[in-house]
Image (cartoon, helix red, strand yellow):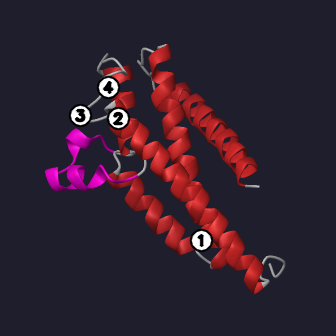
Amino acid sequence: MAAGRVVAALIESALVAAGTYGIVSAFVPLHYHWTAAALLPLALVALTATGFSLIIGGLTLVFKRIQLLNDSVMIVVMLASAGALPLIAVPGWMAGAGRAFPLTAGIASLYGVLLGHRPVTALWGTGGLVWLLVTAAAYLAAGILAFRLGERIAKTRGTLARY
């Protein structure tokens, strides 16, 4: 059951990313040098985002009305994880705290590959492969666990059919 949701979230993430890229590139010239090396951080960002989505999904199974919480968390994640602003444009304390957020390592790695022309195989540092792999694995595992736990609680309470 969780595997199907992971695949669905990956497909949704790909469609949203493609749509966003298409719309933005129609109005703003984008000067990215796409290489095959960008596929690894992109795939790991998708896995990380899938894990984060599964956490939100698990919470939704238990607490039905979490729209405000979800929106608030997403704003903090986008600002603190360098999703909206690069790490070099935010204060040092925010850049340090942002490294624990889901998308920071993946976005930093994509910046390095697409804009900084750095190899994706750098192990350490901002956007390093080790932290990128650890973050993706941790969020995906936490997401699957949270979703399964939320599903179990909802089944025990009998609240899955209520809404």
- Label 4 to label 1: alpha-carbon separation: 34 Å
- Counting residues from the start of the chain, the first of labels 3 and 2 encountered is 3
- Counting residues from the start of the chain, the first of labels 3 and 1 encountered is 1
- Counting residues from the start of the chain, the first of labels 2 and 1 encountered is 1
Label 3 amino acid?
Answer: Gly
Give the farthest residue toward the right: 161
**Marks 3 and 2 in Cβ contact (< 8 Å):** no
Tell me which residue sits at (40%, 56%) in the image: 77
**In the rendering, which numbered label is found on residue 130?**
2
**Marks 3 and 1 in Cβ contact (< 8 Å):** no
Reading the image, the residue beneath label 4 is: 112
Label 1 amino acid?
Answer: Leu
Q: Nearer the observer, disc 4 or disc 3?
A: 3
- Label 2 to label 1: alpha-carbon separation: 29 Å
- Counting residues from the start of the chain, the first of labels 4 and 1 encountered is 1
Q: Is residue 14 visible?
A: yes
Q: Nearer the viewer, residue 11 or 120?
A: 120
Q: Secondary structure at mark 1?
A: helix
Tell me which residue sits at (53%, 47%) in the image: 49
